[in-house]
Amino acid sequence: MKALKKRALFTVPISILLIAVIVTSFFLLSLKPNATGISQAQKLSEYSKPAVVRIIDYAVVEWQFNDYYPEVEALLQELDYQTVIGGSGSGAIISPDGYIVTNAHVVEGAKMQEADLANAAFEQLVALVAEHFQVDYNEAYEYMVTYTQYTKVTRALKVILPGGDVLDGEVKSYGAPINEGKDVAVLKVEGKNLPTLPLGKSETIEDQDNIWVLGYPAAAESDLLSPDSSLVSSMNAGQISATSKKTEQGSPVIQLNAAATHGNSGGPVINEKGEIVGLLTFRGDTVNGQEVQGFNFAVPVDTVKEFVNQAGAKNTSSPTDQLFKEGLTLYWGGYYKNALEKFEAVQRLFPNHPEIKQYITNTQKKADDSKILWSDYRTIFYIVDGVAALLIILLMVFTFAMKPKTAVASTQKNTIPDLNGDGKMDIEDIIIALQKQQKEDKKKDE
């Protein structure tokens, strides 16, 4: 028992220390980046904006003027005998290889007949002539229709990514403009590893759900802003106001109260999960000639999916999305060195990501203050924990399973009996015992 206690005094403290090492390693490995200080709206903004694009659909109509009116000729020369007609809207990338969802009316020009485009451009030209010469529109129309004809129509459909890339777009599936049918179109641009947004489900949309509208509203543009500001999309918050309204043609729409204006058309409406639940399509009627905010309508996502399927597109996330989100979580949690690795990986996959250069710069500046991400040392921790656990087992076996060696008890009696019968053992008993021993020795000698 004494030997067991001595071993335990040595082995138990060491075992406790080794257990503390294992517990500490599990604690450190459980530490994860904490982004609780970042609002959900801010997270959604950072996650979503890289996938929101500006779409410009236009046609250049060239004119031939057949009169010799010098003033009109001079005006046409100033215009280089061309008129540009078209408009812009918004859209969202839904696949890494470049499929984009938007409104049909945003890309209506790409589907119009050449003559219809020329007529629309002619009306624009007539309005310009009437204003320039301060004459009645009808008068200008009669003159211009007599002496002007179009010679060429050149169409263009451009998609501008938030990073500044300008790509040619191709219409892959097409519904119909507002009040003619389902206002959805799917475009395709050439690209890979593009940022994307996921498509949600219409059945999950509930009245008063929080939503956000993203896009490039014209009302947010100004001559006072820098040119590169046109690449930055807006994100406006609101709620679903109604879920079961329909257009005159019977197409379902959802109503929302988030602020939006022309230019927002085709822009995604996202929910709290960052999923597209609709595409902004039109605004409510004006009141007393004034646009009233808070009454806007969107095509629900299930209608959008019909055209995605027609186009043969697959709504999948991109490696760029995953790395960027991981990098943001690390960045917001203070793990700047680890965030830098993720951001640099994003840049390698998609060099013109709109946010990545700024985040790389910021993380480089803060690298010296970076926290340690212990999960990077997971293998080392596992090895140390394994060795510690083995040592604990060996120490416990040594302490409790292995019995200490004990001296063999002697069977020979060393006590002296009471030989003189006085009831106690004393020197006399020893003398008597010695005398008996001597007599026995003599008998053996004889």
Image (spheres, rainbow, N blue to C red):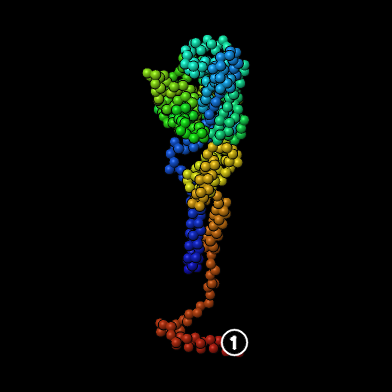
Residue visible at 47% across and 82% down in the picture? 416
* Circle 1: element type: helix
Q: Is residue 161 above or below residue 176?
A: below
Residue 270, horizontal then vertical, whole percent: 47, 30
Residue 271 seen anywhere in this rendered image of the structure: no
Q: Label 1 crowding class (10 Å Cα cut-off): few <14, some 14-19, many 20+?
A: few
Question: Residue at image x 52%, y 20%?
Answer: 105
The image shows residue 215 at horizontal and vertical percentages of 49, 29
Above/below status of 4 relative to 210: below
Residue under label 1, please give it: 444
Report the front residue among 58 and 283.
Answer: 58
- Tell me which residue sits at (52%, 31%) in the image: 52
Which of 408/416 is in front?
A: 408
* Amino acid type, label 1: Lys
Image quadrant containing the C terminus: bottom right
Q: 363 or 407: which is nearer to us?
A: 363
* Quarter holding residue 163: top right
Q: Quadrant of residue 42?
A: top left
- Whether residue 56 is situated above or below residue 28 in the rendered picture: above
Taking the spot 59% from the left edge, 35% from the top edge, the residue there is 193
State the image coordinates of residue 111 (x, y, percent, origin top left): 58, 18
Q: Position of residue 80 (x, y in %)?
A: 58, 22
Badge count: 1
Residue most extreme to the left: 288
In the rendered image, is residue 253 in sight?
yes
Nearer to me, 96 or 134: 134
